[in-house]
Image (tube, grey):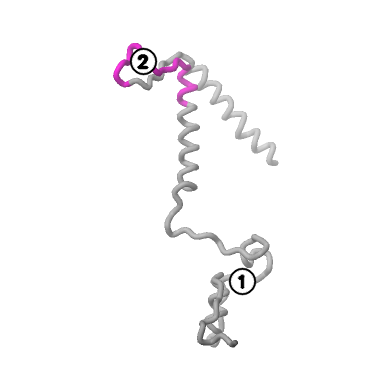
Amino acid sequence: MRKFLNAVILIPLGLIFIAFAVANRHAVTVSFDPFNSHDPSLGFTLPLFVVIIAVAVLGVVAGGATPVALPEPGRRAVPTGRSGRRRGAATGFSTTRRPAAGCSWRWRARQAGRDVVEPAARRKA
């Protein structure tokens, strides 16, 4: 089924890509010299479809790299246990259950994934 869906998507996409390349095969000069457009010091002569596809690929890469480089300030990592999996993923333990009314602050802190350190006044010597 997956091969069939790939063929249904990739074959028309490839045909569109080939038609786009044939229709835009004339050469254009990409100049990075804004002061001398007739004889640029840094410029390339490429087919138009190469320029358009290169710009599209750079846009996809930049769009994918931006969230990695600049994460949201409110985003935090999902708590994991020693195994590296999300807590409660395959253990059957619910991470959304509420504690009973008489549960201690230690239980709540452990459920939230925080390390619990006993206060200095309560430590036994």
Label 1 Cα crowd, 10 Å radius (few <14 / some 14-19 / many 20+) = few
For image coordinates 46% across by 25% down, the residue present is: 52
Q: Name the residue nearer the viewer: 5 or 112.
A: 112
Inspect the image, locate mark 2, and give the three-letter code of the amino acid beneath it.
Answer: Pro
Occupied quadrant, residue 122: bottom right
Say whether residue 39 is magenta: yes
Give above or below for 33 relative to 78: above
Q: Report x, y in % for residue 14.
A: 58, 27
Element type at marker 1? loop
Q: Is residue 52 left or right of residue 15?
A: left
Which residue, given by chain and number where applicable, does mark 2 sit on?
40
Residue 5 as seen in the image, left or right of residue 19: right
Q: In the displayed structure, would residue 62 be above or below residue 116?
A: above
Q: Of helix, strand and loop, which one carries label 2?
A: loop
Residue ID at (61%, 32%): 10
- The N terminus: image quadrant: top right
Q: Amino acid at mark 1?
A: Ser
- Closest to the camera, between mark 2 and mark 1, is 2
> Which residue in the rendered view is the most extreme toward the top?
39
Residue extending furthest toward the left: 35
Residue 75 spot, x, y in % from top left: 47, 58
Instruction: Looking at the picture, tell me which residue is in the foreground, 92 or 37.
Output: 37
- Residue stretch in magenta: 34-52
In reply to whether residue 109 is colored magenta, the answer given is no
Residue 94's mark? 1
Which residue is more in the foreground, 9 or 101? 101
Label 2, label 1: how many angstroms apart (C-alpha)? 65 Å
Q: Residue at x 55, y 76 (%)?
A: 116
